[in-house]
Amino acid sequence: MYLLLSQLSLMDLIYVCTTVPKMASGFLSGNKSISFIGCGFQSFFFVTLAGSEGLILMSMAYDRYVAICLPLHYPTLMSRRVCVLMILASWSMGAVNSCAHTVYALHIPYCRSRAINHFFCHVPAMLTLACRDTRVYEYTVFISTILFLVFPFLGILLSYGRVLLAVYRMRSQEGRKKAYSTCSTHLTVVTFYYAPFAYTYLRPKSLQSPAENKVLAVFYIFLTPMLNPVIYSLRNKEVLGALGRVRGRICCKKI
């Protein structure tokens, strides 16, 4: 679990560094332009990390399923080798998917304004400036969304359905409480991550608006990577103890 969690933290860190520094410098300096190659690199890393993180979250759900439902088989089913293979598969599949989308976006002709109505190089926002019909690519985006969002999300729901059933049958109240705490933490992260992505990419093009897409992007670009460390840290007893001591000092000062 800690190996998978470290990968999630690494992905969140790179994820933020892909878009936020350039966006912040543009707002502060007023120079909101980006080179064509720079736009391609930003798009590639964003799509890679978005797809890879979704697969890592599914791997973490499988880890919890094995830990709670098949505890005696955990050392075999979730060995270090299995974890490394899951991580490599997540990165590889995310990179391959990203290559396909980025190469397409960089090779189609753009004859309209080059001003992208977004705060980073978002491929769907770029394609609104294309000269030719992009309906085939829109179908490709829909298929990628099914593979990297819907299927992993269904896998997570299936894993937690089995987990909740196993937890319900537990006799130990302390074990049940610990299992619920572990599951609720991960489900919170999954909800914050998958919901805005699914709402953005599964809606028909006719129902989308640039302003709404930018608001939704704030959730999966800024809020989710920022909240992940906070949500997982609140399960750590040392962190909770430190927060309790700080709260106690504040109360004493008020008195």
Image: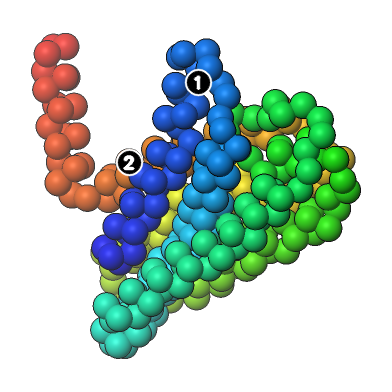
Relative to 92, is 194 on the left or the right?
Answer: right
Relative to 86, is 1 on the left or the right?
Answer: left
The answer, for residue 209, to whether it is visible in the render is yes
Is residue 110 depicted above or below 85 in this figure? above
Of marks 1 and 2, the one in the foreground: 1
Amino acid bearing label 2: Val
Is residue 176 depicted above or below 43 in this figure? below
Q: For the residue carrying disc 1, how many other residues have a C-alpha within 10 Å: few (<14), some (14-19), or many (20+)? A: some
* Residue at the image position 44 percent from the left and 45 percent from the top: 15
| Rendered image quadrant of residue 211 | top right
Amino acid bearing label 1: Gly
| Rendered image quadrant of residue 176 | bottom left
Dot placed on the residue nearer the N-terminal end, 1 or 2: 1
Is residue 32 depicted above or below 61 in this figure? above
Disc assigned to residue 191: none
Disc assigned to residue 230: 2
Question: Under tag 2, what secondary structure?
Answer: helix
Which residue is identified by label 1?
26
Q: For the residue carrying disc 2, how many other residues have a C-alpha within 10 Å: few (<14), some (14-19), or many (20+)? A: few
* Residue at the image position 28 percent from the left and 71 percent from the top: 172
* Residue at the image position 72 percent from the left and 29 percent from the top: 114
Nearest to the observer: residue 147 or residue 64: 147
The answer, for residue 165, to whether it is visible in the render is no
Is residue 119 depicted above or below 80 in this figure? above
* Residue at the image position 19 percent from the left and 42 percent from the top: 239
Q: Position of residue 150 (x, y in %)?
A: 65, 62
Q: Position of residue 50 (x, y in %)?
A: 53, 52
Q: Quadrant of the N terminus?
A: bottom left
Task: Please say which color scheme the image uses.
Answer: rainbow
Q: Position of residue 107 (x, y in %)?
A: 71, 50
Question: Under tag 1, what secondary structure?
Answer: helix
Q: Quadrant of the C terminus?
A: top left
